[in-house]
């Protein structure tokens, strides 16, 4: 629907990460989503895997990489680990991440990338919902 392998909508609106199509990167505190000491891309086997500023895509083949389920909600949402959260910034980050990983943008990709997209999207939704509500944010902080 969006035209091509990488999707025309993200390219046109300028939210695609740097290195993929020359757009600006998202800020992200976590260095990797691979979850191993020497990450490799599942698709091309290239060295370095998803160690990039955005942490979601292989820098060589642009394949979506598996999410790191141990990643903290605050680092995923690029927020300071604190009870006080800027909800406008949180919402903006949520929208940025969903534009990158939402399953609707992976309809023409491999089944593996579709599965990773669903997992990433679920993690982003969970992090957003948890950090948005003060009670769940507080409980998350003390857990």
Image (cartoon, rainbow, N blue to C red):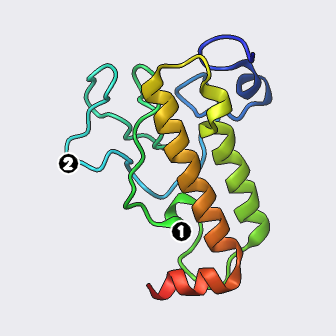
22, 107: nearer the viewer: 107
Q: Where in the figure is residue 92, as x and y percent of width and height?
A: 75, 55
Residue lying at 47% horizontally and 28% vertically, measured from the top left:
113
Crowd class of label 1 (few under 14; some 14 to 19; many from 20; radius 10 Å):
many
Q: Where in the figure is residue 102, as x and y percent of width and height?
A: 64, 38
Residue lying at 73% horizontally and 18% vertically, measured from the top left:
8
> Could you tell me how far apart the alpha carbons at marks 1 and 2 are, in whole angstroms?
22 Å
Q: Is residue 63 visible?
A: no
Quadrant of the image occupied by residue 7:
top right
Left or right of residue 44, residue 19 in this image: right
Left or right of residue 6, residue 116 in this image: left
Q: Quick one: SS at disc 1? A: helix
Looking at the figure, which quarter contains the C terminus? bottom left
Q: Where in the figure is residue 5, as x and y percent of width and height?
A: 59, 14
> Mark on residue 74?
1
Q: Where in the figure is residue 54, as x and y percent of width and height?
A: 51, 43
Quadrant of the image occupied by residue 46:
top left
Q: Residue furthest left?
A: 37
Find disc 2 in the rendering and name its residue. Answer: 37
Residue lying at 49% horizontally and 45% vertically, measured from the top left:
119
Q: Quick one: SS at disc 2? A: loop
Q: Residue furthest top?
A: 4
Left or right of residue 102, residue 87 in this image: right
């Amino acid at each position: 629907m969006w035209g091509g392998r990488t999707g025309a909508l993200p390219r046109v609106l300028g939210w695609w990460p740097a290195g993929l199509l020359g757009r600006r990167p998202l800020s992200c505190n976590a260095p990797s989503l691979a979850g191993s000491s020497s990450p490799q891309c599942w698709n091309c086997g290239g060295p370095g895997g998803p160690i990039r500023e955005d942490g979601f895509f292989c820098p060589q083949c642009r394949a979506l990489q598996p999410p790191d389920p141990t990643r903290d909600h605050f680092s995923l949402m690029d927020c300071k680990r604190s009870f006080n959260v800027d909800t406008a910034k949180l919402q903006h980050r949520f929208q940025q991440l969903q534009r990158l990983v939402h399953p609707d943008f992976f309809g023409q990709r491999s089944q593996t990338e579709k599965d990773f997209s669903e997992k990433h999207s679920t993690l982003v939704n969970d992090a957003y919902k948890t950090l948005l509500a003060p009670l769940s944010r507080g409980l998350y902080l003390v857990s």
